[in-house]
Amino acid sequence: MFNILIFVFLLVFTDSSVSELPTLYEYFTKDGIKTGLSDSHTYFTLNNKNITIFSGALHYFRMPKLYWRDRLKKYRAAGLIAVETYVPWNLHEYQIGRFDFGSEGSDFEEFLNIVDFLTLAKEEDLFVILRPGPFIDSEWDFGGLPSWLLRYEGIKVRTSDSVYIKFVERYFKKLLELIKPLQFTKGGPIIALQIENEYGNTNDHIHPVDINYLEILKRILRKNGIVELLFTSDTPSNGFSGTIPGVLATANFQTQPIKELSLLKKFQPNKPLMVMEYWTGWFDHWTDKHHTRSAEEFGIVLEKILSYNASVNFYMFHGGTNWGFMNGAELNNKSVSEIDNKGFQPIVTTYDYVAPLSEAGDYTDKYFKVKELISTYNTLKIKQPSMPELHRRIKYPQVEIIGELSLEDIINQSFHLNIDNLLSMELLPINNNSGQSHGYIIYRKSNVYIPSNSTLQIEGRVCDTALVLINGILKNKILDSKEDLNNFGFWKMKDSFLHLGQDSYHNVTLDIIVENWGRVNYGFLEQFNQFKGLWQGNVTINKKNVHFNEIIPLQFQKKWIQKLQNWYKPKFGGGPKLYRAIIEIDDPSDTYIDMRDWNKGIIIVNGFVLARYLKLGPQLSSYFPAALMHKGPNEILIFEHFVPAKTIKFVENLIFKDM
Ligand SMILES: *[C@@H]1O[C@H](CO)[C@@H](O)[C@H](O)[C@H]1NC(C)=O
Ligand SMILES: *[C@@H]1O[C@H](CO)[C@@H](O)[C@H](O)[C@H]1NC(C)=O
Ligand SMILES: *[C@@H]1O[C@H](CO)[C@@H](O)[C@H](O)[C@H]1NC(C)=O
Ligand SMILES: *[C@@H]1O[C@H](CO)[C@@H](O)[C@H](O)[C@H]1NC(C)=O
Ligand SMILES: *[C@@H]1O[C@H](CO)[C@@H](O)[C@H](O)[C@H]1NC(C)=O
Ligand SMILES: *[C@@H]1O[C@H](CO)[C@@H](O)[C@H](O)[C@H]1NC(C)=O
Ligand SMILES: *[C@@H]1O[C@H](CO)[C@@H](O)[C@H](O)[C@H]1NC(C)=O
C-alpha cells in the first residue's frame, strides 16, 4: 500500500514536472532514425510518429548572426517546433562562380553561414523547413536571383532555359553539399524542402507554365543527395498550375482559410494539409501607407487553420531587415500585356511585417496569440523553454555631422570606366565581369556646351530615378511630395524632359546619377527584365544625343567606404553629398536611427550599407542593432541626395508616417 502511494506520488510529480518531458528531438528520435517526414497519409508522420508542424519563417540573412540564437529561442518558447528559411542565391554567389557561405569576405559574409544557422536551429530544439529557391521572391532584390544572370543575353530565368539551368546546377551543387548532411534522416534538422517558389504565379494565362522547370529542379535536388520530403507552395484559389505529381502541394494565404484549405484538400484528398505561408502581416512600399493587421483578426484565421488539423508555417514569424540595397519591388499592374516599369513599387528597408516578433525582436500581441493557440491545439507533450528576456534598446544622444564629401570628392575616389554609350549597371565589366548589382551608376560627360533654354530628355524610363547635375549643381526639383514622383527623374515618366534654365554653360561637366531602388521579386516571367540605369533609349539635349564619355559605378562596397578620405568641415547646402558622424558607444545596445530631419538617401554604419531612407515614408526610422556596433567610436555616413540635417538623431522604435 505504502509503495503504491509513493509510486502514484512519483507519477503525479514527474508528470507535472516540465523538466521530465522529452525534448522535441528526444521525442522523435530517441529510438533511432528510420524515416523522415512522410505525406503518405492524411496527416504527417516523422520517423513513424504523428506530427502536426507549427513552424515560423526566419531568414538568417535578415538578422545579424549574433541574434540567431535569441530569435530561435523565442520561436521555441512560443511552442513552434520548426523554423523555415529561404536561401538567397544573390548573396551566396555574389560574383559569377564566387561563393560565400560565411567566410569568403563578401560584404554580407557575417550573415551567410547557413551551416551554423541550421546547426543552431537543432541546438535550440527546432526542425527546419528549407526553401532553397533558386528563386525565393521574399520581397528580396530580384527574388534572390543574382543580377549577373542578366548579362547572358536572352536568358530566361525561372524556366528550363539551359543557360539558366547551368547556373542553377552549379550553385545547387555547392549549396547542397553543405545541406546534405543536415537532413533529418542523416541526423540533422531539415525535415522538408521546397521546390522554387509560388511558381503558379508565373501563369499569365497566355503562355504555358514551364512545369518541366520544376521537374528539372526536383532532379537536381535528388541528384545532389536531397532525400527528405519535397513540396511546392501556392495560393489554392489561384489554381494548382505550379504543382507537379509526386510533390506535396501546400497553401499560401492570409484570409479565407476554410476556402483555401478545402480547395487544397479537394486537389490532394489523401495528403496532409499544410499552410506553408500563413501571412501574419504585410510589407510596405515607399510612399504608400503602412500596412497593419490586428492580433484579433490574425488569431481568428489561425484558429480556423488549427481546427482544420492543418500544419502551419507563419510567414513571417519574425521578419527582420532588408539591409541596404537588398529590398525587392513589385509592379502594381499584374496584366502581362501591360508590363512596364510605370507601376514600379519599391519595398522599404524594414521587414518588420507586423509579425509576431517585431523587427527588433520584441514580443507582440500576435506572439502571445500564437503561444496560446499552439498550447491549445498541440497534443505533443514536449519540453518548452521559457521566453528569453528582451535586448535593451536605447535612444542615443544625437551626434553632430563633422565631415562632408562633395559628389566630386566621391567621384574622385571612385574608379571610372571610359565607356561612350549608355550601359545598364549589370553589363559593366566590373566585379570580375559580374557587373554592378546595387547602388548608383553615374553617367558623365565632360567639356559640354549647353546653350540657354536647353531641354534634356531621357528616352524610355529611368531605372529607377535620376539626378541631373551640371558642374556638381543639382538641376532636379527636390523630392518633397508624392506628386513629385510624377515629375522628371522618376520611373513613372517615359521620355521625360528637364528644362535646364536660362543660363548657358560652357565647358561644363554633366552628370546623371541613377539610383537602383531594388529589382522586382514577384510576377510573370516577362517582368524579369530587370536592368538598372539608363538603357532604354538615348539621352538628348535639344534633341541631339549626348555621348557620355565615362561611367562611374557608385556601389558603396565596404572596402571602398573604409578607404574614403579628405573629409572636410561640413558646408551642408544641397545636392548629393556624403556626411559623416562619429558616435562613441560604451555599451552597444539596439537603437533606431531617426531620419525625419533628412530627405532621401542611404545610411552606412561602420562600412555596412544599413538602410535606405525617404522623408515621404512610410518608414521613418532605421533599425541599428548592437550587433553592428562596437565599443568605442562608430562611424555613421549618410549619402543624402537633396537636403541634409546637421545632426543624426536616434529613437527607440520603428516609426511610420501617418498617411
Ligand atoms: C495518427 O493520427 C491519425 C489521424 O488522426 C490517427 O488515426 C492515428 O491513430 C494516429 N496514430 C497514433 C499512433 O497516434
Ligand atoms: C480534426 O481532427 C479531429 C480529431 O482527430 C477530428 O475530430 C476533426 O473532425 C478533424 N477536423 C477536420 C476539419 O478534419
Ligand atoms: C493594368 O492593366 C490593365 C489591363 O491591361 C489596364 O486596364 C489597367 O489600366 C492597368 N492599370 C494600371 C494602373 O496601369
Ligand atoms: C582628386 O584627388 C587628388 C588626389 O587625392 C587631388 O589632388 C585632387 O585635388 C582631387 N580633385 C578634386 C576635384 O577633389
Ligand atoms: C575577383 O576574383 C578574385 C578571386 O578569384 C578576387 O581575389 C578579387 O578580389 C575579385 N575582384 C573583385 C573586384 O571583386
Ligand atoms: C575645358 O576645361 C578643361 C579643364 O576642365 C580645360 O582643360 C580645357 O582647355 C577647356 N576647354 C575649353 C574649350 O575651354
Ligand atoms: C539613339 O540614337 C541613335 C543615333 O541617333 C539611333 O540610331 C538609335 O536608334 C537611338 N536609340 C533609340 C533607342 O532611340
Image: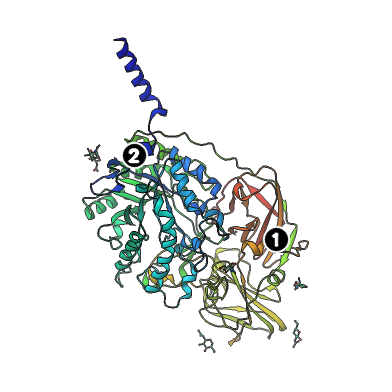
Q: Which residue is mark 2?
A: 28
Label 2 lies in ligand 1 vicinity (Cβ under 8 Å): no
Residue 424 sits in which quadrant?
Answer: bottom right
Question: Vertical placement of 458 versus 2: above or below?
Answer: below
Compared across the picture, whether 87 is left or right of 235 comes to right
Three-letter code, disc 2: Phe
Q: Secondary structure at mark 2?
A: helix
Residue 195 place in picture, x, y as percent:
35, 59
Three-letter code, disc 1: Tyr
Question: Vertical placement of 587 versus 530: above or below?
Answer: above
Compared across the picture, whether 481 is left or right of 528 comes to right
Q: Which residue is mark 1?
A: 579
Compared across the picture, whether 130 is left or right of 388 comes to left
Asked whether the viewer can see residue 200, the reply is no
Question: Vertical placement of 633 versus 157: above or below?
Answer: above
Residue 455 place in picture, x, y as percent:
61, 82
Residue 482 sits in which quadrant?
Answer: bottom right
Among all residues in the image, which is located at the extreme top?
A: 2
Residue 519 place in picture, x, y as percent:
49, 66
Q: In the rendered image, which quarter contains the N terminus?
A: top left
For this rendering, which residue is in front, 339 or 152? 152
Residue shown at 21%/51% (left/top)? 269
Compared across the picture, whether 445 is left or right of 200 comes to right
Residue 50 place in picture, x, y as percent:
28, 40
Among all residues in the image, which is located at the extreme right?
A: 569
Question: Vertical placement of 509 versus 165: above or below?
Answer: below
